[in-house]
Amino acid sequence: MRIHIASDHAGYQAKAILIEHLSLAGHELVDHGTNSEESCDYPAFCISAAKAVANDPDSLGIVLGGSGNGEQIAANKVVGVRAALAWSVETAKLAREHNNANVVGIGARMHDENTLKEIAQTFIETQFPGDERHVRRISQITEFESTR
């Protein structure tokens, strides 16, 4: 799986951990920045990763920050992206199963290293089953998105 990943300064260490962990699991990671813990503005990095996911429908995205909130909001500004904020393994799973999310926002300051890995791994491994009620709801979002 190709995974586009981005962070701000608060998520930089978590991003490095996930790049190593997910690469060892056989995934292809594309790093959209930032490249240090020096204070920076997250929108450009997260939007870059989100655009890459929108243009590569077979990929997924991970955006990281202190809480993951702003990063997830920025990613959602890109047409074709359904970014969910995962604050647990269960919310990462449901984001894929119910919403067919293609980007996940994770708060680096909210989780220990093992939980970060579990959330990311769960998001990547969970498939969208495509049942009618969820497809119908996602279609409504996509329909609205096309009118913007």
Image (tube, helix red, strand yellow):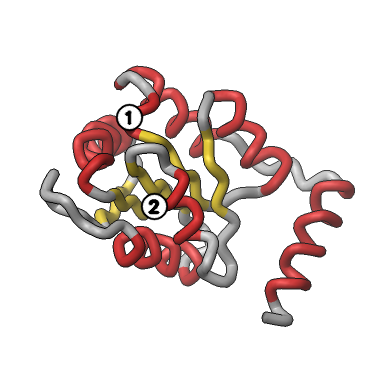
Please report the residue visible at 88 percent of the width from the left and 47 percent of the height from the top. 133
Q: Which of marks 2 and 1 is nearer the N terminus?
A: 2
Q: How many labels does the image show?
A: 2
- Which quadrant does the C terminus fall into? bottom right
Q: What element carries label 2?
A: strand
Residue 2: x and y in percent read: 39, 52
Residue at the (25%, 40%) spot, across then down: 10
How many neighbours does mark 2 have within 10 angstroms: few (below 14), some (14-19), or many (20 or more)? some
Mark 1 nearby-residue class (10 Å; few <14, some 14–19, many ≥20): some
The x, y position of residue 46, in whole percent, is 37, 59
Question: Does residue 15 appear to the left or right of 98 in the view shown?
Answer: left
Q: Name the residue under label 2.
A: 2
Q: Nearer the viewer, residue 91 or 43?
A: 43
From the image, state whether disc 2 or disc 1 is nearer to you: 1
Q: Is residue 107 left or right of residue 97?
A: left
Between marks 2 and 1, how big is the CA–CA gap? 25 Å
Q: Do the residues labelled 2 and 1 touch (CB within 8 Å)?
A: no
Q: Relative to 15, does residue 113 appear above or below in the rendering?
A: above
Residue 109: which numbered mark, if any?
A: 1
Q: Is mark 1 on a helix, strand or loop?
A: helix
* Image coords of residue 147 (percent x, y): 73, 81
| Amino acid found under the numbered disc labelled 2 | Arg
Instruction: Inspect the image, locate mark 1, and give the three-letter code of the amino acid beneath it.
Output: Arg
Residue 66, disc = none
Residue at 54% over, 61% down: 76
Looking at the image, residue 73 lies above or below residue 22 = below
**Looking at the picture, how far across and down is residue 99, in whole percent?**
69, 47
Tell me which residue sits at (49%, 38%) in the image: 124
In the visual, does 144 lie left or right of 80?
Answer: right
